[in-house]
Amino acid sequence: MAKYGSGRGIKRSWLIELVVLVVTGGFIVFTVSQSSKEISEVLPYIPNEKIFNFLSNENEKNQDLLLAKIEKLNRKLFQEQQARLDELEKQQRLLLKEIKSLKSPPAKASLRDKLVYLYPYDPQAKFPAYIWQTWKHGLNDERFDEKYRQGESQWAWKNPGFVHELFNDDTAHTMIRHLYKQIPEVIDAFESLPEVILRMDFFRYLILYAKGGVYADIDTFPLQPIPNWTPENVSPTDIGMIVAIDIDSSSPNWRQESARRLQFGQFVIQAKPGHPVLREVISEIVEQTQYKKTQLMENDKLKLTGSSNQKSLQISKWTGGALWTDVILKYLNDYIQSSIYQTITWQDFHDLEIPKLVSDILVLPIKSFASELEIPKDGKIQDPLAFVKHYSAKIWKTT
């Protein structure tokens, strides 16, 4: 009885489920057919243009989202790639710097060949953005003259983006030992010079030859930014050096006042590294110093002798303005180096009033680097050729 009653229950349950399924299925079919009927009835009344625009807008949205994702991914990949390239370039520069510091010129090469090997000249290069100065006192030393302190700060302020370095005797010596460690005769000459003023002169040539840029004595005050020194009608690639006239005497007794009737100033110089004039002046100083040492008695040291005026003339011919002028004129008269096929003398620069480009040397008038203008409070310079004020202090006498 129990088994029979159970069978009837199962059969009845199955029938009930079947009925429910049929009814539900019919309802779904009826609903879908009704919906299809409704859609088919409505579609004819919807313009095709609206349907197309709807589908098109949806497609554009999807495309825009996809393009945005691709662009974002592309930017990320580009940034990562650029970072890797920057790092590789940085490593390459460091490697080249190390290789350059390790390379040594041939042992049997002449002094000039060694200098060329170490710091070759590229006339098409830009002027490096360096400003070099020297002084016996540091900026924080109370003995640093306020007038010089103002000039030193103005060199940096008027030339943003330039590397500005102030050396004292010790740091200058260390720098020369580093830059010229492959040419020991240069270091020996530097260390053998008996006076600070001689070493200051030699340092400016050495730092400019190796690094380029601008050297300015501590007793100078910039009136205009360095880029203003180059005339608008002259390309910087045509210039290898910028100097100004320092002395231009019309006195018949000029020999009592200076070593040369006309002298180029070396208290402010702009030059590209490796310039032949700098190479020659360095070589002349080294050879002069070596020769003077051979004339000494045993255990004697080099020194300046005579009166103050006599010492000034010795300095001028050894490392100063007279030697500097002689070397520049020698360069200009070497047609292989200067490409000038006529004789150049001091008279070509006598009473110079405007900048004059001779070969790759731009010569400025006296007033450009030794302006007598008072420093204007408003900063406006009336004379467009007034670039630097030079106090012409005889600072070597106090060193």
Image (tube, grey):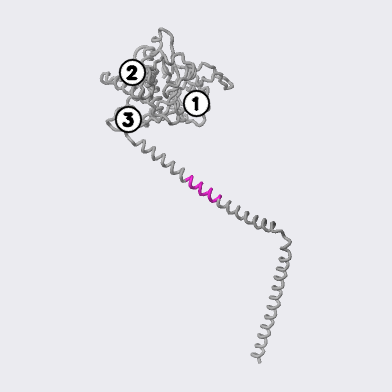
Residue 81 lies in magenta, yes or no?
yes
State how far apart marks 3 and 1 are (Cα): 31 Å
Which label is found at residue 114? 3
Element type where label 3 sits in the image? helix
Label 3 packing within 10 angstroms: few (<14), some (14-19), many (20+): some
Q: Is residue 389 magenta?
A: no
Which residues make up the magenta segment?
A: 71-83
Q: Residue furthest top?
A: 252
Left or right of residue 140, residue 336 in this image: left
Residue 303 badge: 2
Question: Which callout, 3 or 2, points to the residue nearer the camera?
Answer: 3
Q: Position of residue 130 (x, y in %)?
A: 46, 29
| Above or below, 295 relative to 46 | above
Q: Position of residue 359 (x, y in %)?
A: 41, 23
The foreground one among 105 and 23 is 23
Against 73, is 341 above or below?
above
Q: Percent x, y for residue 211?
A: 41, 30
Looking at marks 1 and 2 on the same chain, the residue that comes earlier in the sequence is marked by 1
Q: Which mark is residue 226?
A: 1
Q: 154 or 55, which lies in front?
A: 55
Q: Main secondary structure of the magenta part?
A: helix
Specify the amino acid type for callout 2: Lys
From this viewpoint, is residue 132 visible?
A: no
